[in-house]
Image: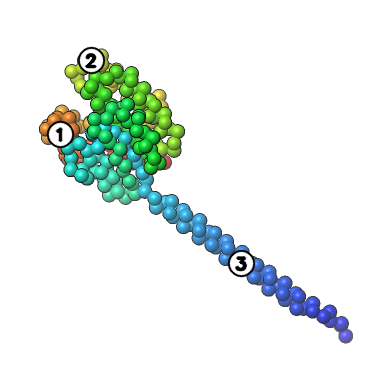
Amino acid sequence: MKKQIPGRGSKVRQDNLSLRYGARLWLVNTGLVLVGLFLSFQAVASEPYKILMLGDSLTAGYGLVKGQSVPARLERALNKDGLQVTLINAGVSGDTSAGGLARLAWAMADNPDMVIIELGANDGLRGLDPKQTHANLDSIITQVKRTPARILLTGMKAPPNLGPEYGAEFNGLFEDLASRHKVAFYPFFLDGVIADPTLNQADGIHPNPDGVAVIVEKIMPMIKKIIADR
């Protein structure tokens, strides 16, 4: 008759229980970690894509009722197309490129995913030195490029009364900057709107709601492409 070692069977059962308990605990912990990662991913994925529009009165919505500015209309149009986007209106009426540069750090505090730069119109209206406008915008782009934000630079045209030489230098600085920094470029912010009295307010400078609609329609494809390429 085989001699039984006292307590051995009990110890084996305890070891088996410990192994099964340990395996279950590992599965539970792993499951919790995976759930946590999934929820974190969902939270990040559900955050809206933030677009900062740094500009002057054309961005601020001068002469328009609330909700009719370019950023506001652009946000609604992009959301309607199924894109979860928030537009941050950083437009200040009367601002020059120097003003935009001075408040850039404050404007970037929301950590946008994209920055649309709409500055220079007041530089041209005041006949400011295009070289200074170039330097200001160059500094803005350089600083934004230090962040993960994508950039869309919009161009402007000088008033014709300032002469062909000034106009050529001023108008060309935007394309030069876009090429130098290799950023997306929309050649003329007021394309399709300028000089059309049906699309502008009484001052002939600022777009009315119909003019804003034209701007939004024309610039949207480029913005959507930048979002899609992120």
Residue marked by disc 2: 164
Residue 220 to residue 134: above or below: below
Q: Amino acid at mark 3?
A: Leu
Residue drawn at (37%, 29%) of the image: 140
Q: How far is disc 2 from disc 3 in space, using C-alphas? A: 78 Å
Q: Is residue 104 visible?
A: yes
Residue marked by disc 1: 200
Circle nearer the N terminus (2, 3): 3
Q: Is residue 189 visible?
A: no
Q: Amino acid at mark 1?
A: Asn
Residue 30 to residue 86: above or below: below
Circle nearer the N terminus (1, 2): 2
Disc 1 on helix, strand or loop? loop
Residue drawn at (24%, 43%) of the image: 73
Q: Nearer the viewer, residue 2 or 140?
A: 140
Give yes or no for contact between labels 1 and 2 (Cβ–Cβ under 8 Å).
no
Residue 137 to residue 221: above or below: above
Disc 2 on helix, strand or loop? helix
Q: Nearer the viewer, residue 213 or 133?
A: 133
Residue drawn at (35%, 26%) of the image: 137
Task: Determine crowd level at label 3: few under 14, some 14-19, many 20+ residues with C-alpha closer than 10 A.
Answer: few
Q: Amino acid at mark 2?
A: Pro
Q: Nearer the viewer, residue 116 or 103?
A: 103
Quadrant for the C terminus in the image? top left
Circle nearer the N terminus (1, 3): 3
In the image, residue 125 lies at what x, y percent?
Answer: 22, 23
Task: Determine crowd level at label 1: few under 14, some 14-19, many 20+ residues with C-alpha closer than 10 A.
Answer: some
Residue marked by disc 3: 25
Q: How far is disc 1 from disc 2 in space, using C-alphas? A: 25 Å
